[in-house]
Image (cartoon, rainbow, N blue to C red):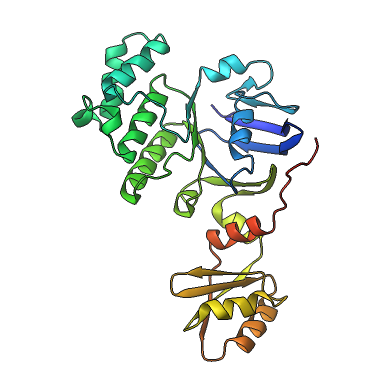
Amino acid sequence: MTDPAIDVKHLCKSFHGRRVVDDVSLTVGRGEIYGFLGPNGSGKTTSIRLMCGLLTPDKGSGTCLGFDILQESASIKRRVGYMTQRFSFWEDLTIRENLEFVARLYEMDRRRETVDLAIENLGLQGRANQLAGSLSGGWKQRLALAACMLHKPELLLLDEPTAGVDPTARRDYWEELHKLAAQGISVLVSTHYMDEAERCHKLAYIAYGKLLATGTAQEIVASQKLFTLAVRGDGLAALAARLEAMPEVAQTVMFGTALHVSGTDESALQGAVNGTSSGYEVTPVETGLEDVFIYMMNHSRDNFGARP
């Protein structure tokens, strides 16, 4: 199919007088992994739910998987797999029992065959009879993904799916997501991990309900027009405090043994840092996605109490 998986325009949503999604428009292609970044409480989860007909917007329109998000939400829900932040399966049931229960909820035919295939596809064979409550975080997430995929959805909604999962399990999880995307399944995923964000085909940065930037990781970095210098030496905390007081410096961020200093005017930044950093090693570095993420977060205005 060539039509977008999601095509929404001007979505707005308010709760208790606070606008949590404010004029969001977005298009997601089939087979794309689309990442959502933003501070806690920025409207990421609400935006994802609105785009897929799981919540009704106060304003706006659009389609998801070819269905109208306002009029055909029931048809959308049957074609979507949704995975929440919190592990929400039955810990006193085994992996197989959990999947069989979910298959019954979907009233699926050939349930045993479907569950067997899901267990095989996600490498759960050796743990199929293990209680879900005894699984590590990574295996719990595999179980949750297997359950999401039972009814063969065209779209996956993943809300910070690897929070609290170790790096190896996170890497394996993302390998599975890319395999699914290669099969034409679209994925919307919210994350705070920069390495995960860079593995998405495209990204959206949302802050306090507003969509501030979209595109590939490279496009979002370029859009902010930040220049960054890495400073190394002793006493970096005191140096950061001095630099942050200078108008030429947009931000300072510690990265291990280096202090990243960023600004929007390259020559002014160089002059400010060189004039303050005598005795330090100063080198230009490529501005990273994390530099930009922190910059956009620091320059976003909280909309708490903003009226619709």
- Examine the image and state in which quarter residue 218 appears: bottom right
242 to 7, vertically: above or below: below
- The reply, left or right, for residue 44 in relation to residue 135 is right
54 left or right, relative to 115: right
Q: What count of labels does the image hold? A: 0
Q: Residue at x 26, y 23 (%)?
A: 94
- Residue 171: x percent and y percent? 35, 47
Please state the horizontal and vertical placement of residue 191, each as a whole percent of the image.
50, 45
Closer to us: 35 or 185: 35
Report the residue at 62% width, 33% height from top. Answer: 46
Q: In terms of depth relative to the viewer, which is nearer, 165 or 220? A: 165
Instruction: Give percent across and percent down for residue 25.
Output: 70, 37
Farthest-out residue, bottom: 279
Q: Extreme left residue here?
A: 126
Residues 293 and 188: in front is 293
Residue ID at (69%, 20%): 70
Q: Residue 248 placed where, x, y %?
A: 70, 76
Q: In this view, does 304 lie to the left or right of 132?
A: right
- Rendered view: 105 above or below 260: above
- Residue 17: name its quadrant: top right
Q: Quadrant of the C terminus?
A: top right
280 vs 106: above or below: below
Q: Nearer the viewer, residue 203 or 179?
A: 203
